[in-house]
Structure formats: structure tokens, C-alpha cells
Amino acid sequence: MNDTVKFGGIDLAVLCVYLVGVVSFGLYMGLRQRLGRQTGAGYFLAGHSLSWVTIGLALFSTNISALHLVSLAQQGYINGLVYGNFEWMAAFALIALALFFAPFYIKTRVPTLPDFLQRRYGQGCRDFLAVISILNAIFIHIGFSLYAGSLILHALFGIDVWVSVITITVLTGLYAAVGGLTAVVMTESVGTIVLLAGSCLLTVFGIVKCGGFNEMLHLIGEAGKVNPAATMSVLRPAGDPSGMPWFSMVLGYPVISIWYWCADQTIVQRVLGAKSENDARNGALFAGFIKILPVFLFVLPGLIYLGLTYQNPVQKTDEVYATMIQDLLPVGLRGVIAAALLAALMGPISGSLNSMATLFSYDLYRRIRPQASDRETIHVGRIATFAGIVIAILWTPLVANFKTIFDGISMLLCFVAPPVSTVFFWGIFWRGASYRGALAALWGGFVLCLGTFLVFYAPLGWAQGVGGSFGATWLSVLTWFDTTVVKGYYVNYMVMSFVLFIICSIILHVVSRLKPDAPDAARAELTWPHPFAALRGPWQGLGDFRLVSGVLLVTMMFLYVIFR
């Protein structure tokens, strides 16, 4: 243990009990399932038995990682609440998932989203999405979570980064491989409760140390005089020092959210395991309500701590979270935060490993061996799980090349999402979207997104030099989208994601009109005739998805008015 954070015996006991308990619980759930007749659907999709409560908790846990706890506290300390938009705007994406996407997923009972894309378009689209989704699970969901978790565990306990990476990954992979989705979502549900409870402690003790809520607001106001970016506002004007003006979020976030919340296997697999369409829809909406909390539990503590320390600020902002634990929490409660960190570290990793194994088994292996039995498929899934662990561990050190961890994952999502979001969005809202149009948008968008990222955004120091005259011409077309161009070869990556989505959409529309599909009744059933058709259906009382989504929508609008 290092000198940064001091833990007492109670803290270590809480931490050990949680770690042993969650691994044992995951193994128990998996072994209990194996005593029965374990099918592919039972292993990979929990036998379509998940309730809306379990789905909502598991969605949140898979999304929230140690990366969020560390990086959102850091962003709160540096930029105030503006990065909370990544949490609050997710609620709108989850409404879209509940209203427009989940019904098709449940109706077709697809095991994976690439399978859905094959039914809507064709085999080539399925292959593309399967490979991209596997890479996304390993390099983004697992890789970034491991790196962030290893840093905070090193800061808290002085544990070697590689030791923490390997230990946590092996323990998590153990119950994920043995128990499948059932073990994953049950441990994620427990982890979510621990995560929220532990994070709440930092906010409460921060306010208490300020001297109360009003004094907290006063200290934040004083800190804002020193650091103009550190305010309670989530909607910032052009030129704001945070570099994240309101229009970049309004334009860019919907693009990445369609991919992340509605079309990413790692996230949506919990919805695919729902026992009914209503559970799938309300599970997504429940997660939307929980996503309100991170702004107050993850981002706000960083801003509160700035108010407490602005006269003597923390020099290494990536250590803000560990410093907050040391300064704000008494010995005896720090173990709860450490357990919350483990929950935030293990949840996304276990979920991503299970989703990656599902994709590999159903979309790649069964493509080669369609006659494979459930037992053989599950065995291959377990092998894929451990292979994913090895690859993720090898990739983890390269994450350090990004300016901040949160910037890194946000930036990568902005260049993965546009082509996938394009084919899913137009696929369910426009019956004219054809197989060749979708394939052109996927591959053309992939090349365009990869090239744009490597030339202008790659965090290795050489990207700007590669641009040359081509880069200058490219920027002259894009600069008008963003009035706050930073340096010579930079446009806000959220705005760039929107531009790339528009280009991919143009490709899809042009090719679809030139190369239309033959009429197909089955494909037509996977497209809404108009958006309001998603609201049809019998009334289901207070738990009706239309009422719940309306309440969530009004709640989010109210919050944005207050914190504008």
C-alpha cells in the first residue's frame, strides 16, 4: 500500500468480502445453471429470463466502469459539469432503444445484433458488424476499463499495474466464462448497487466538508473565478474553455449513442435476454433513470473538490479521485469506495467478455460450422473469452497515449459509430435502405472514419504532419461547423462524428436508390412505416412503456433547464 490513501482493517475486510463474494456468487449462478440442461440461449442470453429491473441495473453496470469514476471526477475538477452530458444524453438514447429498436430485437429473438443486421440487409452486413463489435468489446470496453482500473488500484494500494490488470481480468473472466450471461447480469446488478452506494458517499461527505449545500455553491463560484470552465452549467457556448460547446453534443452525441446504446452487442445483449418486450423496453428506460445519477455521484464530487482546493489545486488531475477518497472519507468507509471501484471495473469487463464470446460463437464460428451443437458452441465461447482476455491485456498499455482516458474512449467511439449508426438508423426508419447501400455505407464509412482519425486525431504526435495540403483542404470544408477550431488541424471530434454520419447517410441513400433490393415482406416488417407506429399497442397500466418514457423525457428536460 502506498502513502496516497490509508486504509484501515475494516476497509480491507469490506474489500475482501466484496471481491470473494462477487466471484463466488458469479460462479454459483453459473454452476447452478450448468447442473440443468445448458443451452446456447441459456448460456449466452440467460434463457430469455431477464426482468426489467435486472436489465436496467445490468445496462448501467456494463456502461459504468472504473474509467467513469476516475475520469468523470477528473473532468468535474477541470471542466465542471459539462462532461455530464455524456451521462444525461444517454437517457434520450435509451428512450430510442425502448421505443424503436428493442421491439424488433425481441420480435425476431435474434441472439446477436449482427444477426438482426443480416435479417434486415444481408450476410455481408452481418460479417462486418460482428468483426467490428468484437474489436470494440476488446479494445474499447475491456482495454480502457482495465487501464483506468489498474491506475486507480495502483494509486489506492500501490499494486503493480500489471498485477492488478491480470488478477482482475482472470477473476472476472472466470465467472463470465463459467456462468455466461446469467452470472454476468446477476453480478452486475449487485455491483451497480455497491457502485451507487459507494459513490454517494463521496458526494455527501464532500458537501458536508464544504459546510453545507449553500456553502458548496459559494465555493464552486469562487473556484469558477480561477477556472472559468469549472461551473455547474452543462450547456456551454462556443469558445468555452472546456472545448465542448452545446452544439457539439447536440450534433455528435446522437451519432455515437445510436451505435453505443442501440446497436452495440456489449450493451444491448442484456435487452436481448429479456423475458418479454415490455421488460426489454422498461429495462432500457429504468437504465435511463439511473443515468441521471452519475452527474451528481461521479462528476459533481470532482467539482466540489475543486471548490475545496482551488487555492491549492491538485497538480496531477488524474489523481483527483484517489486524493478525494483520502481527504473526504474517514477510515472505515474507504473500503466501500474500493469495493465500488472493483464493481465498476469488473462489471464492464464481464459484460464485454460475454458479448464478445456470443458474437464469436454465433456470428463467426457457426458460420463455419452451422451444424455445431449447443455444447460445442458454448465451449468455443469460453475459449473466445480467454483469448479476448489475453488480447485486451496486451492492448492496455497503449491506452496511455491518449491525452485523457475519457477523451480517448469518446474519440474512438466518434470514429467507430458513424457507419454503424447510419445503417441501423435508416434500416428501421426507411424501407428503401438496400443491402448494397448498407454495405457501401459500412465499408466506405469505415475507410473514411479510419482515415480521418489517423490523419487528424491519432494521439501519437504525427497525425497533424501527415495532413499537409490535403489536411488544409479538408479542414476548410469542415471548419464552419465549429467556431472554436483548436490548433491548425483540429475540429471537435463530436462535430466530426456528425459530419461523417451525414456522409455515410448520403452514401447509403445514393447506392440504395441506384441498387434497390427486391421487395421482401420479411424485411419490410423490420422497418417502422412511420415513427409513431412504435407507440401503438394496448395500454399496460402505470408500467406502460409510453408513460415511463414520457416521464423520463420530461425529467431530463427539467434537469437541462435547471443546469443549463
Image (cartoon, rainbow, N blue to C red):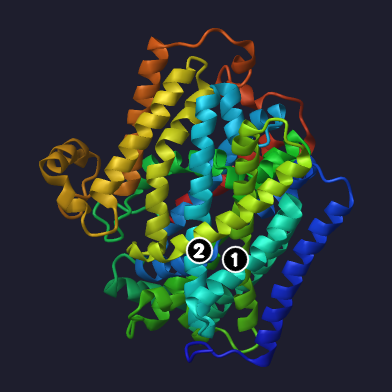
Q: Nearer the viewer, residue 264 or 292?
A: 264
Q: Is residue 439 above or below residue 38?
A: above
Is residue 80 shown to the viewer in this render?
no
Rendered residue at 63%/47% (across/down): 357
In percent of width and height, residue 253 lies at 42, 44
Decide: is 524 above or below 398: above
Q: Secondary structure at mark 1?
A: helix
Tell me the residue at 38%/82% (across/down): 309
Label 1: few (<14), some or many (≥20) within 10 Å? many
Outermost right residue: 36
Residue 219, percent from left and from top: 40, 77
Residue at 28% in and 51% down: 457
Q: Quadrant of the N terminus?
A: bottom right
Name the amino acid type tagged 2: Ile
Q: Earlier in the sequence, mark 1 or mark 2?
A: 1
According to the picture, the residue beneath numbered tag 1 turns out to be 169
Q: Which residue is mark 2?
A: 393
Query: On the image, which quarter does residue 188 sit in?
Result: bottom right
Cβ atoms under marks 1 and 2 closer than 8 Å:
yes
Packing grade of label 2 (10 A; few <14, some 14-19, many >=20) is some
Q: Amino acid at mark 1?
A: Thr
Who is closer to the viewer here, 526 or 42? Answer: 42
Counting from the top left corner in percent of width and height, residue 356 is at: 59, 48
State the residue lying farthest toward the left: 469
- The answer to whether residue 424 is left or right of residue 351 is left
